[in-house]
Image (spheres, rainbow, N blue to C red):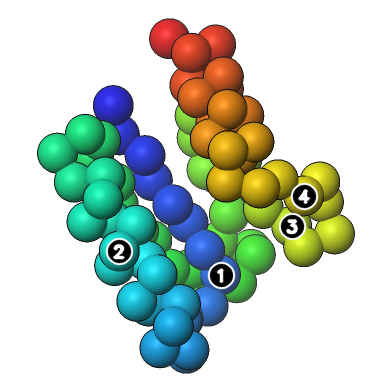
Amino acid sequence: MKLEILFIGKTKERWIEEGLEMFLRRLQGRISIELHPLKDFHCLKGVENQAIYLDPRGKMYDSVEFHAFLFKQIETTK
């Protein structure tokens, strides 16, 4: 399975970069992950396949809830 993470802008905070690196290391070998920084929201036009958009005004999940949500989405697209 391949997971592509698209995000707007660059990570300027070192703690965010460290978190991403740790996240990628933990999942290495279990799932293929690619990070794609985008210039702005207009770059999202034409994104194919299923997409999950993260919005600070949206529903909040803790780690366990987000894991369950994400894998439910993955299972329904198989």
Write down the residue under mark 1.
Answer: 8
Q: Is residue 17 left or right of residue 42?
A: left
Q: Indicate which disc residue 55 carries.
A: 3
The residue at 52%/43% (across/down) is: 47
Instruction: Check disc 2 and give the amino acid type.
Output: Met
Q: State yes or no: discs 1 and 4 in contact (Cβ < 8 Å).
A: no
Whichever of callouts 2 and 1 sits on the residue coming sooner in the sequence is 1
Write down the residue under mark 4.
Answer: 60
Q: Is residue 72 above or below residue 66?
A: above
For mark 1, give the secondary structure: strand
Q: Where does the image place residue 12, in percent across and percent down from the top left?
A: 47, 90
Whichever of callouts 4 and 2 sits on the residue coming sooner in the sequence is 2
Q: Indicate which disc residue 22 carries.
A: 2
Question: Label 2: few (<14), some or many (≥20) within 10 Å?
Answer: few
Instruction: Check disc 3 and give the amino acid type.
Output: Asp
Residues under labels 3 and 2: Cα distance?
Answer: 22 Å
Q: Nearer the viewer, mark 3 or mark 4?
A: 4
The residue at 82%/51% (across/down) is: 58
Task: Work out whether residue 51 can be spotted.
Answer: no
- Of residues 52 and 21, which is closer to you in this image? 21
Residues under labels 3 and 4: Cα distance?
Answer: 9 Å
Residues under labels 4 and 2: Cα distance?
Answer: 22 Å
Question: Label 3: few (<14), some or many (≥20) within 10 Å?
Answer: few
Q: Where does the image place residue 59, in percent across and percent down from the top left?
A: 81, 46
For mark 4, give the secondary structure: loop
Residues under labels 1 and 4: Cα distance?
Answer: 19 Å
Instruction: Check disc 1 and give the amino acid type.
Output: Ile
Question: Label 4: few (<14), some or many (≥20) within 10 Å?
Answer: few
For mark 2, give the secondary structure: helix
Residues under labels 2 and 1: Cα distance?
Answer: 20 Å
Q: Nearer the viewer, mark 1 or mark 3?
A: 3
